[in-house]
Image (cartoon, rainbow, N blue to C red):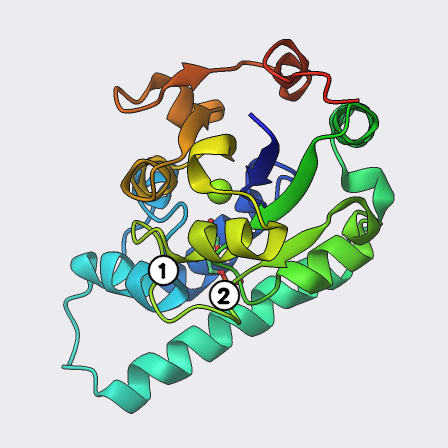
Amino acid sequence: MKAFIFDMDGVLVHTDRFHYLAWKEIADARDIYFDERINDRLRGLSREASLEIVLERYHGAPLSAADKAALCAEKNDICRRYLAAMTPADVPEGVRETLEELCARGCRLAVGSSSKNTKLVLERTGLLDVFDAISDGTNITRAKPDPEVFLKAAEFLGVPPADCAVVEDAEAGIDAAKAGGFIAIGIGPAARYEKTDHSIHEFSDLLTWAPDLT
Ligand code: G6P
Ligand code: MG
């Protein structure tokens, strides 16, 4: 293992909460039932694919493509208000220290996130400089479970997928990692997924998997 590719939302930072709150506000305003269990199915999916799942409980007048685009834009506005208010204090304990230790051991580090807000979050939380490469929703055409975002991250790092571990909280992300030929490490909900190669409970548990390449 020479490199680690991290999903962002729900792995590096708890922005998964903000995505939930934004979808909840959209749903509540339209009398659409939405809860945290439904939200778990949205983890790792694109904004547009997430909306389709939220709309499974919608029983109003048919929505045009323009209506759906407007809903996605509104969700993103709500979400970005939360994201823009983030600070380095929102990085969970142990995350920055673990990333720095992986770096010190000579491991290459990348982010592989479907989010188009990746750089905003990494800037606000002071994590941007820790990574050698960022692959996100702005450089892909197919979101997870397609492996494109991780394949691009590996390409940016110059490390073959078989030598990279992907760290994910989403089943869609574990599927993407396996489809791309990566080692899949699950945390949070993905730690209980049967396709996960290795499960971790704390972010710092990664240090037990990381080689010293120095
Ligand atoms: C991540 C999150 C998803 C989100 C997706 C797109 O994968 O886990 O919940 O839908 O990014 O994020 P965006 O910020 O572009 O709407
Ligand atoms: Mg995630």
Q: Is residue 41 above or below residue 162?
A: below
Q: CA distance from mark 1 to mark 2?
A: 7 Å
Q: Is residue 155 above or below residue 71?
A: above
In this orientation, which residue lies closer to the viewer: 157 or 90?
Answer: 157
The answer to which image quadrant residue 186 occupies is top left
In this orientation, which residue lies closer to the viewer: 118 or 60?
Answer: 118
- Pinpoint residue 151: horizontal percent, then vertical percent: 43, 52
Badge 1 element: loop
Residue most extreme to the top: 208
Q: Is residue 136 above or below residue 63?
A: above
Three-letter amino acid code of the residue under disc 1: Ala
Task: Sort mark 1 into few (<14), some (14-19) or many (20+) by Cα contacts within 10 Å.
Answer: many
Q: Is residue 40 above or below residue 165?
A: below
On the question of residue 160 being in view, the answer is yes
In this orientation, which residue lies closer to the viewer: 146 or 75?
Answer: 146
Looking at the rendering, in which quadrant would you find the N terminus?
A: top right
Mark 1 vs ligand 1: CB under 8 Å?
yes
Looking at the rendering, in which quadrant would you find the C terminus?
A: top right
Earlier residue among tags 1 and 2: 2
Badge 2 element: loop
In this orientation, which residue lies closer to the viewer: 76 or 150?
Answer: 150
- Pinpoint residue 212: horizontal percent, then vertical percent: 73, 16
Q: Is residue 152 left or right of residue 118?
A: left
The answer to which image quadrant residue 52 occupies is bottom left
Task: Sort mark 2 into few (<14), some (14-19) or many (20+) by Cα contacts within 10 Å.
Answer: some
Q: Are marks 1 and 2 in contact (CB under 8 Å)?
A: yes
Residue shown at 36%/82% (left/top)?
69
Three-letter amino acid code of the residue under disc 2: Gly
Mark 2 vs ligand 1: CB under 8 Å?
yes
**Residue behind mark 1:** 143
Residue shown at 44%/40% (left/top)?
161
**Residue behind mark 2:** 137
